[in-house]
Amino acid sequence: MCGIIGYIGKKSASPILLEGLRRLEYRGYDSAGVAVLQDADMLVRKKKGRIDEGLAQVLRSEPAEGSLGIGHTRWATHGVPSDENSHPHLDGSGKIAVVHNGVIENYDALKQRLLKAGHKFHSTTDTEVLAHLIGDYYEKRRQGVAPLSCPGSRHQHGAAMHHPLPHNGDGAAAPSADTLTLAVSDALREVIGTYGLAVICTDFPNTIVAARRGSPIIIGIGKDEHFIASDANAIVAHTKKVVYLNDYDIATITPERFDVLNLGADTANVQISNLEFSHEDAARGKHAHFMLKEIWEQPQTVLNALRGRIDFEGATAKFGGLNMTAAELRGIDRIVIAASGTSWHAALVGEYLIEELAQIPVEVEFAHEFCYRNCPLEKNTVLLVLSQSGETADTLAALREAKRRGHRALAIVNVVGSTIAREADGGIYMHAGPEIGVASTKAFVSTLTVLTLLGVHLGRLRQLSANRAREILRALEALPKQLEKILAQNAALKKLAKKYARAEEFFFLGRGYTFPIALEGALKLKEISYIHAEGYSAAEMKHGPIALIDAKTPTVFLVPQDPMYEKTMANLAMIRARKGPIIALATEGDRAIKKVAADVIYLPKTLDLLNPILMIVPLQLFAYHIAVARGCDVDKPRNLAKSVTVE
């Protein structure tokens, strides 16, 4: 949620900030703003609404020139979307500007204290409180009132900093870059909550201070220039070299160098990484929306997830990052999968897969519940977390809780260098490439692919036969071509979507492996089209929900020719008897389904456990075309942001 961009160097900052904000708009699009230093002046431009209709127009009429600046695109938490609540926010003096992602949980107590001290606020945000708190400590530092030490450890990249704070004749500390850094650290020691932030000050036209706790911040490294971002998409066009800040890191950045201190650790752990994707990968290309582009990329993302991981000779899957020996993997007695949203639906499929193939008991938990209830974890229990971004707040909290309790925590993530990827004991990358659309598509399919490989890998360490394993691996290799065949039905799905675009309610029904896909299909539809949709096990309909069936309520039935086929057809007959319109996703060659369903989409035949990967794709396209037909903003659905980095 929310996006941060910053630039310091020799170029004009505003165009870089604006371009970066456009690339971050999928993370928040209530409002946007920038603060640019022009000589000794702080130029703040911000506006409610989308970037091109708001901030971009403001910058055209009121340019902000300078080679240092920070920007923000907002997804509201504290305070309604408005010009006043837009970031950046200033301190009481107007010298300091702050952009912030996250939530300051104790902001009200801090605000009351500052009000009593004479501070005046112009917004209802927690971020403005943080700006005033930093400003208050900055003034104390200048006057020599606050302690001059800053506990923590430093990592220096470039020339050394001068840490002592010299004083001028009247007893006030002559401002140095450390003055601002120490003021930020003073303020953050009082903060309860999460933050990713960037701070600039008119006294230091050559410095940006950035910090993180629970909300990602990246430093992009250039030649005589540096970048700040909450997401690598914003800066990949300018640099491939990045540093991912750790929790409690505070970075002081100039055009030539950066210096990182950590408020809690003995050493500041700084690693320079290379981004795995390009500027073109993060572009929309010829497609009308990022979501559509990402749906069409799924044959390739499945290939990426499989590449180098299939071992036909050993009849198994190979992974390089699990960091567990074969004996340790055989010793697992139970797996708990923690995830949220679309990843939680993938986890449900993973439960079926791992239990069938490896005979290991699996329990799926909402990540946000795992941390707050005393979930019993036996000695040989492993936690597996799923997250596309690798930054999902509640999923990260679940990982940390499992590790605190002494259990191994593994992860399946998409973003290399993300917090979950770095903190997990081991894991697997999806290699899906950047996913910009708020409604996850290709990352979901990639997760299912990786979970299938993991099931085979664990199964072969137990009792899964080589013949069965090879059968699954061959079926996995066939998936990209089968997905292309499904995508070729795009025109038919678009026509079907137009037919049902005015419906106000939908049911999605499946059984066994397709039950979680019914949940995910319903989620996709309501996320981007705002139609009320519910996913159920087909067998559950007669236990209550069937009361809602009528001639105006379409039902999407997932009816592959699997062991549950006859029972699912019987459930379908119940809906038909109550005159409910039926859309069926069926296996090629199924003639019986034509007699009972109003509309049928045929899918290639595959193994039962791979049906989820094939069946979700037409549901993604169906939801997409309905949303377009209803005039919805597919890539930026209302009230949603791509990565939920606050609870």
Image (cartoon, rainbow, N blue to C red):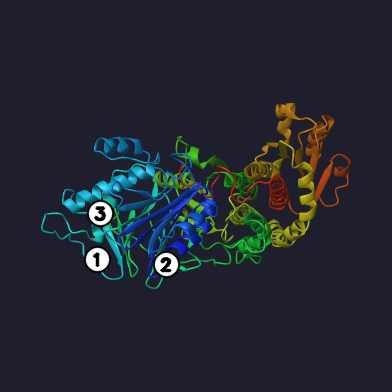
Return the residue nearer the eye: 543 or 552.
552
Q: Is mark 3 on a helix, strand or loop?
A: helix
Residue type at tag 1: Met
Residue 593 vs residue 3: left or right?
right
> Closest to the observer: 131 or 249?
131
Amino acid carrying label 3: it is Leu
Q: Do the residues labelled 3 and 1 touch (CB within 8 Å)?
A: no
Q: Callout 1: few (<14), some (14-19), or many (20+) C-alpha neighbours within 10 Å? A: some
Judged by depth in the image, the label closer to the viewer, 2 or 3, is 2
Tell me the number on the disc at residue 12: 2
Q: Mark 1 points at which residue?
A: 161
Looking at the rendered image, the disc whose residue lies closer to the viewer, 1 or 2, is 2
Relative to 511, is 141 above or below? below
215 displayed left or right of 160: right
Q: Residue 182 carries which label?
A: 3
CA–CA distance between discs 1 and 2? 26 Å
User: Compared to 30, does 178 lie above or below?
Assistant: below
Asked which secondary structure carries label 1, the reply is: loop
